[in-house]
Image: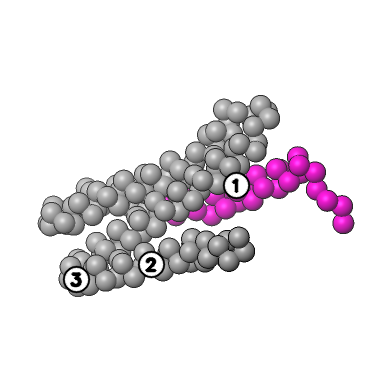
């Protein structure tokens, strides 16, 4: 099997990045839409101050995630055919990682709110904390541990 050229590698990596982003963006978009819709329900007016703050932080985290996850496509459109693919890939990789951070915080916030509404504030902290640790472990820590072990 012949080794791929730099151009072929960049094209392959670009395709991989786009596929990964395609799997992340719809979930963030749906969550953002639900969060916007919730604001206009009767139940929203009964939220405690803590719940309102967590809701807003969750909305901001989701918006941040969407900006980060969509940024590689915007950069690519502006720099199309400018020979900037390697820069776009490095930048897009960092943005995708930041986007997963934002969506992990958003999912954590949603779980906090639902758990607080259904059970209690202490349980909301436990469930949200446990979920965030799970996301961090599966999404980042395994890869970082492997990198540290190999490096």
Residue range highlighted in magenta: 1-30
- The reply, left or right, for residue 41 in relation to residue 93 is left
Write down the residue under mark 1.
18
Q: CA distance from mark 1 to mark 3?
A: 39 Å
Q: Secondary structure at mark 3?
A: helix
The secondary structure making up most of the magenta span is helix
Q: Give yes or no for contact between labels 1 and 3 (Cβ–Cβ under 8 Å).
A: no
Please name whichever residue, 105 or 87, is drawn nearer the observer in this view of the structure. 87
Identity of the residue drawn at 29% across and 70% down: 127
Q: Secondary structure at mark 1?
A: helix
Mark closest to the chain's N terminus, 2 or 1: 1
Which label lies toward us, 1 or 3? Answer: 3
- The reply, left or right, for residue 122 in relation to residue 19 is left
Write down the residue under mark 3.
122
**Mark 1 closeness class: few <14, some 14–19, many ≥20 residues within 10 Å:** some
- The N terminus lies in which quarter of the figure? bottom right
In the rendered image, residue 136, in percent from the top left (x then y), is placed at: 43, 63
Q: Secondary structure at mark 2?
A: helix
In the rendered image, residue 150, in percent from the top left (x then y), is placed at: 62, 64
In the rendered image, residue 26, in percent from the top left (x then y), is placed at: 47, 51
Mark closest to the chain's N terminus, 1 or 3: 1
Identity of the residue drawn at 48% across and 60% down: 140
Which label lies toward us, 3 or 2? Answer: 2
Write down the residue under mark 2.
133
């Amino acid at each position: 099997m012949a080794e791929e050229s730099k151009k072929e590698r960049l094209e392959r990596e670009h395709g991989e990045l786009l596929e990964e982003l395609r799997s992340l963006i719809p979930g963030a978009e749906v969550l953002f839409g639900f969060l916007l819709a919730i604001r206009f329900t009767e139940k929203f007016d009964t939220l405690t101050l803590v719940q309102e703050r967590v809701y807003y932080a969750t909305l901001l985290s989701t918006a941040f995630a969407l900006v980060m996850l969509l940024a590689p496509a915007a950069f690519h459109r502006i720099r199309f055919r400018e020979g900037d693919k390697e820069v776009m890939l490095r930048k897009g990789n960092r943005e995708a990682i930041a986007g997963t951070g934002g969506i992990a915080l958003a999912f954590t916030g949603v779980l906090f709110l639902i758990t607080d509404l259904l059970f209690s504030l202490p349980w909301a902290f436990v469930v949200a904390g446990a979920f965030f640790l799970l996301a961090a472990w599966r999404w980042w820590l395994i890869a970082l541990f492997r990198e540290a072990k190999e490096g």
